[in-house]
Amino acid sequence: MAKTGDPARAVSGPALDSLDFTLDRGSPVPLYHQLAQQLEAAIEHGVLTPGSLLGNEVDLSVRLGLSRPTVRQAIQSLVDKGLLVRRRGVGTQVVHNQVKRPLELSSLYDDLEAAGQGPSTRVVRNETVPAPADVAAALGVAEGGEVVLLERLRGTHGQPVALLCNYLPCGLLDLDGARLESTGLYRMMRATGIVLHSARQTVGARSATAEEAVRLDEEEGAALLTMERTAYDDTGRPVEFGRHIYRASRYAFDFQLLVRS
């Protein structure tokens, strides 16, 4: 039973056995929102993993000492976010945890690993190609000159999250395929002495093409987040131009905004 300021422990159901819920009935924050926030935090931190069963609303309301409408509203808010799904005859199930990435000069691999998300990588392309005009301008090379094209599919919990397309100057570093599948590009750069200093980045959104939908396990036309970035080392040299797409259902950029005085 949930008491004011006391933890409410789910005493049955494997997914909730390790969770304690603290629901403050004296708080101005609605109980459904308190419950939703704590469930979302458990999903984000991997305590509730994809496929975990939470049981049905009646069981949850009894376990937590809450009314069924309160539990229903909490669950619906997470269903709307794509974190939970209701399955007939099964109950409420965790679909996946959305990746929330801080908007700073860091690699997706490092961010996923730091968040305990267990990143995985599949190298799709790793080859030398002629530089298109926009890539040449970003990297400061001649149009048509050789650059390295690196394309990777990044995932977590067995599900694809992003398709990463990067262009690098030839000879910058050894892009060994096995290492690329076991670590991040920026980590490889740092290991060779490249000091990343700054980047110019643009974030946008568009719909998935048929090919992108297949690779990212989405429907054609699904919403994708896009990011285009040129990264520079501490000498001001451009070392990477990236054009990435992310599943909007599983990924979000996290902004911290400050008032300019």
Image (spheres, grey):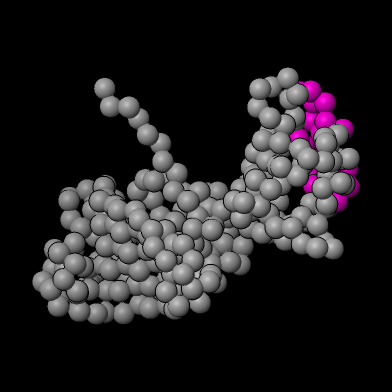
* As drawn, 48 above or below 124: above
Q: For this rendering, which residue is in front, 238 or 201? A: 201
For image coordinates 24% across by 80% down, the residue present is 129
Left or right: residue 4 compared with residue 74? right
**In which image quadrant can residue 207 be found?**
bottom left
Extent of the magenta region: 1-21
| Quarter in which the C terminus is drawn | top left
Residue 157, x across and y down, in percent: 61, 62
Q: For this rendering, which residue is in front, 168 or 155? A: 155
Residue 54, x across and y down, in percent: 79, 51
For image coordinates 72% across by 31% down, the residue present is 31
Query: Can residue 120 be spotted in the picture?
Result: no
Q: Does the magenta stretch include residue 20?
A: yes
Left or right: residue 15 compared with residue 234? right
Query: Can residue 94 be spotted in the picture?
Result: yes
Q: For this rendering, which residue is in front, 249 or 153? A: 249
* As drawn, 145 above or below 22: below
| Quarter in which the N terminus is drawn | top right
For image coordinates 64% across by 42% down, the residue present is 41
Q: Residue furthest front?
A: 69
For image coordinates 38% across by 72% down, the residue present is 151
Residue 204, x across and y down, in percent: 35, 56
Left or right: residue 105 compared with residue 181? left
Q: Most prominent secondary structure in the magenta stretch?
A: loop
Q: Which residue lies furthest to the left in this view?
A: 142
**In which image quadrant can residue 258 be found?**
top left
